Image: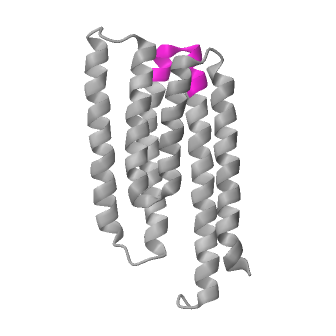
Amino acid sequence: MQDERNPKAQIAQKRRYFGLEEAIFILLVILSIAGIVITDFSQHDGYAYWAFMVAVFGGLAIFVSWLQAKTNENDFGEIVKEQGKHWIHTLVVVSAASLVIKSGQFTEINASLMILMILALATMLDGMRIGWQFSLVGFFLAACAIIVAYVEQFILACIGLGVFVVVGTLLWGYWLNKDTVE
């Protein structure tokens, strides 16, 4: 077993975890684009998809926090409590939005966009705790909601934005980790 205090082992572990975080980031972008496509085909299913994504995003955020806790001195129990409260509060707001929607005040597409914006905000705010990539996913979600509202061919625009964000993040990650390779 490698010594945990070995600097090379720590760098290798951080790279592995960064790779996992990057994979989760890409997964979140793909799930977001899938949600936009689902919403386009079935607005009712789109609303349910975005509500379910709150739990998925929350679970993945807790997983990323666990990875980060393994590489630093943070107490994972405290992180889980904070993350849990954050995402449970988000679910409460989504549930409240559901009640407003059932009252007939919103159409299903408006409901989907509202849930998407709630998820965008929750992801941005969580990104302040666990890293810039989560914040970027939140900004991506908010941008997609705006694109859906204003652009007729919004699926292609959101896919293009998603590709741009993922490629930009991969290049940024490569540039940041370039110094640790040398």
Q: Is residue 133 placed above or below 176 in the rendered structure?
A: above
* Screen quadrant of the C terminus: bottom right
Provide residue 48's location: percent of width, then percent of height.
44, 24
* Screen quadrant of the N terminus: bottom right
Q: Is residue 96 left or right of residue 16?
A: left
The span picked out in magenta is: 36-47
Q: Is residue 51 visible?
A: no
Which residue lies at the image location 64% right of the left edge and 38% below the top edge?
162
- In depth, the one of 135 and 39 nearer the eye is 135
Provide residue 109's location: percent of width, then percent of height.
46, 15
Which residue lies at the image location 49% right of the left edge and 75% below the top edge?
71
Q: Is residue 83 visible?
A: yes
- In depth, the one of 164 and 130 nearer the eye is 164
Residue 42, magenta (yes or no):
yes
Which residue lies at the image location 41% right of the left edge and 31% below the top edge?
117
Q: Is residue 136 placed above or below 120 in the rendered structure?
A: below
Q: Which quadrant of the view contains residue 123?
A: top left
Q: Is residue 34 placed above or below 179 in the rendered structure?
A: above
The furthest residue to the right: 182
Provide residue 11's location: percent of width, then percent of height.
61, 80
Q: Main secondary structure of the magenta part?
A: helix
